[in-house]
Image (cartoon, grey):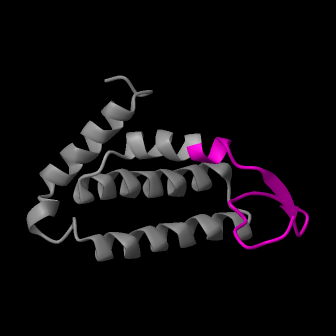
Amino acid sequence: MNQDSYQSMLAIVQSFHDKHDFKNHGGEDLAYRVALMAEELGEISACVTKGKSNEDLAEESADLLILLIGTAISASFDLNQAFWKKMEKLNKRQSRMVNGKIRVSEFRGVDK
């Protein structure tokens, strides 16, 4: 299996969903999945704010990525396509400094 391929990641997450029958046991409920993603984001935050290792940060980030891919499966959308479409939009945006940090946003209704 090509570990650099989105299709391989999608296939292994789909296999995990199938193995545990997520579809028939609430594992693909979108509200539930959002709660799980919020939990994982909290764990990522804890890694950063508590000075945990990069290995811990990588593991928690992988958990979130797996949940994102699983959410795409659950909601029947192509995350790979959505990623590239969004990157195309982002690459057209201007950046600006906000409170000393770079931001790339639409900045609607805000003077430059």
Which quadrant of the view contains residue 47?
bottom right
Write the residue at 48% across / 42% down.
85
Whether residue 56 appears in magenta in the rendering, the answer is no
Look at the image and tell me whether residue 6 can be seen. Answer: yes
Look at the image and tell me whether residue 50 can be seen. Answer: no
Which residue in the rendered view is the most extreme toward the top? 2
Up/down of 33 relative to 60, above or below: below
Write the residue at 32% across / 45% down.
78
Up/down of 77 relative to 49, above or below: above
In front here: 22 or 96? 96
Write the residue at 56% across / 73% down.
42
Write the residue at 79% across / 52% down.
95
Which residue in the rendered view is the most extreme toward the left? 24
**Quarter of the image with the N terminus in it:** top left
Locate residue 32 relative to residue 65 in the image: left or right: left
**Quarter of the image with the C terminus in it:** bottom right
Which residue in the rendered view is the most extreme toward the right? 100
Which quadrant of the view contains residue 32?
bottom left
Locate residue 95 relative to residue 93 in the image: left or right: right
Residue stretch rendered in magenta on the structure: 89-112
